[in-house]
Image (tube, rainbow, N blue to C red):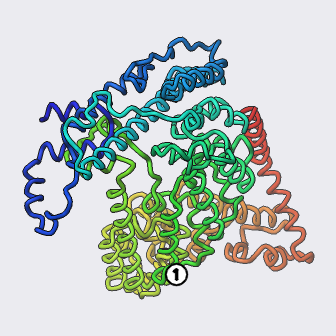
Amino acid sequence: MSIILEYLIELINIPLTLQLISHHVRYPMYYLAQNYASTAEERKQKAKAPLVDSTLLRFLSSQKERKEDDNNGKVPTQNNRVVEVDLPTFTAENIVESSSEKESTQAAAIQEDKPIDISWLSQYNTQRVALKLQALGVDSDVSLKAGEVVQDYVLARVTRSRIRRFLQERDALWESGKYSSSVGSDRKGIIESMSPAAAKNYDIDGVINVMTEYGLTGNDIAAIFTHTPSVVMMRARTIESDDSIQSDKSGDEKQQRQSFALDKTLDLAFVGLLSDTLKLRRYDARKVLRGTPGLLTSKGSSSAIQVVDLMVSLGSSTNAIARDKARLPTLLCRSPALIFRLVAFLSSAQLKVPLSAIGPILRQRQSADLLDAVAPVKRPLTLNDAISSKNMTLNTDSEIRGYFKLDNTIRQQKIDENYRTMEATANILKRSAGIRDFRQILSSHPDALFRHNVTNIHKMVFFLRNDVGMSKDDISKAIQTFPTLLEHDVSRIKDIVKFLHLIEVDEDDLPSILRSFPATLMLDVEKDMIPVVQFLRGIGVRNIGRFVTRLPPVLGYSVEHDLKPKWDFLREVCQFDYFEVVRFPAYFSYPLERVIKMRYEYLRDCKKIPIQLARVDDVLRFGDRDFATEIALDNDKGAAFAKFVEKRSSSSQHPVRKRRKTQQQRSKKKKSIEQQ
């Protein structure tokens, strides 16, 4: 049996069918026990066809042979004859004439009453597709890759259709009581026939022609064929009457009749959505098509339009959506139903985020992790992809099913688990920390609800309330101001509080310090706080705790870039530098170039005032206008000082502006070259 199973796996890549076959082969007693365990009423029901029997095995074997014939350009006819299609004769010179040759082949097939499989299936041969793309200027490697994807997709789709029809006919015979082992056991399997009128809808040349008419290049078409091979089997142009197709009832033809034609999806997605609604340039719209799998399918185009409409209704403008061109393809691939579920969760009574604020939140670059967690992009995989992945072991049935497009169980379980995590986090923040405005948290930290350990958050809130002495409102304000506080482990916060005690910060002052400057809890003791304390002691500050209490942000300042340059300048312009710093610690919080140097130079160079005797707090604590009138003694309401500031700022920033302008010119020139 194991040999038969391995042979079946080699026959065809249909994961779900193989799973069921392997179950029955490996565990026959399990299914036998299930049958005996059924109730008496269930046993009286009408018998159904067995899932696996000798007829199905023989049919799958015939499909193996038929698949090899299709790959070699050979297609069986209704009389079980094999007709070889002369695919290897295609060259770059005669590839343009392939459309007329195909039409003559179809006409001959109609006259001789042959099945149309010979003409319609052979057009999807790898070599033929590659040569068509190469005629449009596509690189040979890219075209061959696209051709292989197209051929594999078409053969898999045709084979699935054949097996599905075989099982339907076999089940019908079984239920009617006419089934026997000899019925349907033809070694060539079911002969797929298609009317000429229906086969006209499968025209890869027409698909390529429609794409080029809409302005797509060969590279665009190759990229679309690679990530969305189903496009090649779409009807190229919309027709008013489908009467010629109504007579055929095969699954693929029904699916094609119900779906949009390619020109309609191009009108909806390429012209309507990307060009008209989002106002993208033609170059950018083509780039989005190349990076958005499924956008040109009927389902994909409708889904993308719904996503954009939903984002607009949530407060995001079309210009804002189109501005982020790098993330736009991923957004268009997301499920509108899953996004709507996220919107319902955020606007629920638990979080109360206004609908008008949800759109801007989801549009942020930081929201990518949140959307991936609850509205992930579905990326279909094949069994070969899963087996060939590195360090991949598929030991259980659930592991196998998780890698296929048709099975959403594991994917849905992960989404539900993420929602449970977000609900638990929201509850702990609402009850323990007193958070009322989740909008402020999610605006700056969109993944705050699902990336953090609920237990750690509870411990952190308990420590800040009971050991530090912060009130519920203080903790709420701190978390809303700095949501990244939720990322830190409670042990790190304990180390910071312990260090503040070591430098003699009063315990009664700790709650007010952490409430006003919660960023203090996110500092690193070794890298940030200890160097600052050493610097302050080096310039003569004895009571570090008092100094830090008066200027808590000083513990986060850089010694090399902030403290030391400001101290060196103060020693040049002030006679009593140490006393001025101790009396006015906020000196280190002012910008050196924009405020400190600007005002001292104005007093020294323009007003000729001896700056060595000026008090630091008098020079810095006023606004620009009050400084000019109160300290510089100007009578023009600060006009002279404003002119001095403008002149000095333009002279100091001129090289930066010039360099920035040069970079902008280079980027515009590069983009124009790419568009050409």
Q: Which residue is pictured at 33% across the width and 58% down the height?
A: 409
> Total marks drawn?
1
Q: Is residue 224 visible?
A: no
**Mark 1 residue type:** Lys
Label 1: which secondary element? loop
Query: If the image is split into quadrants, where does the N terminus sit?
Result: top left
Residue 664: image location, x then y, percent: 75, 43
Please give the residue where the numbered disc 1 appears in the rendered image.
352
**Vertical order, 673 against 299 (above or below):** above
Q: Which residue is pictured at 32% across the width and 24% down the height?
A: 65
Q: Specify whether 566 is left or right of 498.
A: right
Residue 655: image location, x then y, percent: 77, 45
Answer with the quarter of the image where residue 501 lies: bottom left
61, 514: nearer the viewer? 61
Q: Specify whether 458 is left or right of 53.
A: right
Q: Which residue is pictured at 39% across the width and 64% down the height?
A: 451
404, 102: nearer the viewer? 102
Q: Is residue 454 visible?
A: yes
Circle 1 residues within 10 Å: few <14, some 14–19, many ≥20? some
Q: Specify whether 62 is left or right of 479.
A: left
175, 200: nearer the viewer? 175
Query: If the image is split into quadrants, where does the C terminus sit?
Result: top right
Q: Specify whether 243 is left or right of 125.
A: right
Residue 344: image location, x then y, percent: 50, 74
Answer with the quarter of the image where residue 43 lies: bottom left
**Vertical order, 268 against 185 (above or below):** below
Answer with the quarter of the image where residue 523 lies: bottom left
Residue 234: image location, x then y, percent: 57, 41
433, 378: nearer the viewer? 378
